């Protein structure tokens, strides 16, 4: 983490070419994309989990109502 901050600080202090600035921004964009994709995977997992949970609870409730 400290190395990353040091690299960022050095980059801010020196003059960069447009190509270097674009490459740097691309790295950040790819990192943001990975974080967003991770969020999507997590959200999809939560949707699947809750759908299965609702199905299981409805089946349990239907089973208990049949026996009473």
Image: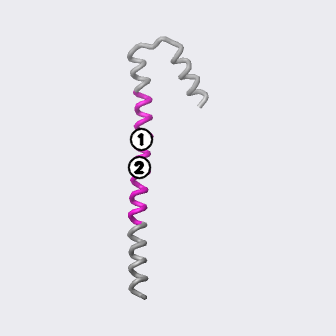
Q: Residue 68: x, y in percent?
A: 43, 88
Q: Which residue is mark 1?
A: 36
Residue 40 included in the magenta stretch of the image: yes
Left or right of residue 8: residue 44? left
Q: CA distance from mark 1 to mark 2?
A: 9 Å
Q: Quadrant of residue 26?
A: top left
Residue 43 included in the magenta stretch of the image: yes
Q: Which residue is mark 2?
A: 41
Q: Secondary structure at mark 2?
A: helix
Q: Residue 54: x, y in percent?
A: 40, 67
Q: Is 40 located above or below residue 53 in the figure?
A: above
Q: Main secondary structure of the magenta part?
A: helix
| Quadrant of the snapshot with the N terminus | top right
Left or right of residue 61: residue 8? right
Q: Residue 2: x, y in percent?
A: 61, 28
Numbered marks: total: 2
Q: Which residues are magenta?
A: 26-52
Pick whichever of labels 1 and 2 is earlier in the sequence: 1
Residues packed near mark 1 inside 10 Å, few (<14), some (14 to 19) or many (20 plus): few
Q: Secondary structure at mark 1?
A: helix
Q: Is 39 located above or below residue 1 in the figure?
A: below
Q: Is 65 located above or below residue 2 in the figure?
A: below
- Residue at the right extreme, as displayed: 2
């Amino acid at each position: 983490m400290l190395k990353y901050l040091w690299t960022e600080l050095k980059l801010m202090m020196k003059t960069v070419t447009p190509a270097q600035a674009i490459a740097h921004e691309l790295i950040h964009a790819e990192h943001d994309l990975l974080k967003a994709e991770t969020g999507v995977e997590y959200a999809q997992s939560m949707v699947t989990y809750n759908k299965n949970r609702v199905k299981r609870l409805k089946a349990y409730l239907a089973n208990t109502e049949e026996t009473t």
